[in-house]
Image: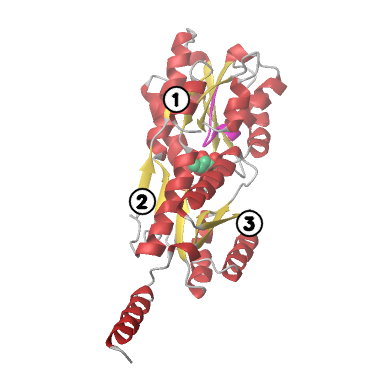
Amino acid sequence: MTLTSRFARLALGGAIALASLGSAQAQDDVTIGFIVKKPEQAWFINEQKAASELGEEEGFEVVRLAGEDGQQVLSAIDNLHAQGAQGFVICPPDVRLGPAIMNRAKQYDMKVVTVDDRFVGPDGEPMEGVPHLGMSGYKIGQQVGNAIADEMDARGWDPEEVAALRITNYELPTAKERTDGATDALLESGFPEDNIFDAPQQNSDTASAFSAASPVFAKRGDFEHWVIFALNEESVLGGVRASEQYGLDAEDVIGVGINGSGAAFAEFSRETPTGFHGTVAVSSTMHGRKSAENLYEWITEGEKPQANTVTGGTLMTRDNWESVREDLGL
Ligand code: FCA
């Protein structure tokens, strides 16, 4: 063997050894999953799409999957393993599934990051070991409360004569943070606590909010003016639809949501305004991109993302929705 070929062999051996060092992966064989609890909702469609776009740019594969209950999530993880995925981003259908999901992922040696809804451990605390990216729920909730108070002011409503429909989801910590933030901001603005009525929803969608809201309007027919808030705009829209069905006029209702996705755009695009006054928009594009990027870098560079990344929002109304949409890349 000549010296040069021996050198070439040694160099090649070294390169192979380097490539297999640690868990670093060659760029072109990375596959990640992106599992969401509500695949039909505009927020999640956009999030998954943004992750796929990043994958196309960076040269990795993104498998988009639905995980609407525990069973479906576990099958999605099996499916990802069969496709050779090294990890997944997930917005779980129930945050208490965290430990079961992590067990399955560990069996397959997959890395996991959560987006939007953070896993809760058996002790009821957030699972700190799983990197998370989500909204700063309380602050965004305060923005909702302030937007409602400002609009009440603009319409010249006397707070004593206004009822608040608070659509709650206390099983989901980010939902509680959001409605707590909105409640506190409203109370600070002088809203009477006794005029706040709860409508606990089973889920985070329009149908569950509609069912929760309807009986509240029926029971409190003595109020002419209503404000509505919830964890997201899909749920506020359920409340607004219930107010319409009950017979309230759009000018007697102020609903303010959270997300800034297709559901809100459709509402703002209607010719006649409805009781859906606004929404605090957060970039679902950024949530999808950034969570996928964090996971990709963890897989390829071995660098674990930070434990908790929080994002902020911007109030979007009929007047400015198109420009906010553009600014947030939605
Ligand atoms: C939760 C809600 C979604 C969205 C997301 C950021 O998952 O259900 O609508 O607000 O947080």
Q: Which residue is mark 2?
A: 308
Name the mark nearer the viewer: 1 or 3: 1
Question: Which quarter of the figure has residue 141?
Answer: top left
Q: Which residue is mark 3?
A: 69
Kindly tell me whether residue 176 is visible in this rendering.
no
Whether the residue under disc 2 has CB within 8 Å of ligand 1: no
From the image, which quarter does the N terminus lie in? Answer: bottom left
**Disc nearest the viewer among 3 and 2:** 2
Looking at the image, the residue that sits furthest to the bottom is 1
* Disc 3 packing (10 Å; few <14; some 14–19; many ≥20): some
Quarter-of-image position of residue 211: top right
Q: Is residue 166 visible?
A: yes
Instruction: Pick whichever of labels 1 and 3 is earlier in the sequence.
Output: 3
Between 13 and 210, the one nearer to me in the picture: 13
Residue 3 in the figure: left or right of residue 248: left
Mark 1 packing: few (<14 Cα in 10 Å), some, or many (20+)?
many
Please tell me whether residue 142 is drawn above or below residue 154 in the rendered image.
Answer: below
Q: Which mark is residue 315?
A: 1
Disc 3 on helix, strand or loop?
loop
SS label for mark 1: strand
Precedes in sequence: disc 1 or disc 2: 2
Q: Is residue 68 left or right of residue 92?
A: right
Say which of 163 and 93 sits in front: 93
Seen in the picture, residue 290 relative to 212 is either above or below; the reply is below
Report if residue 15 lies within the magenta region: no
Location of residue 246 in the rendering, given as x and y in whole percent from the top left corner:
70, 21
Q: Classify 10 Å Cα crowding around label 2: few (below 14), some (14-19), many (20 and above).
A: some
Q: Which residues are magenta?
A: 227-234
Amino acid identity at mark 3? Asp
Could you say where residue 39 lies in the image, as x and y percent from the top left? 63, 47
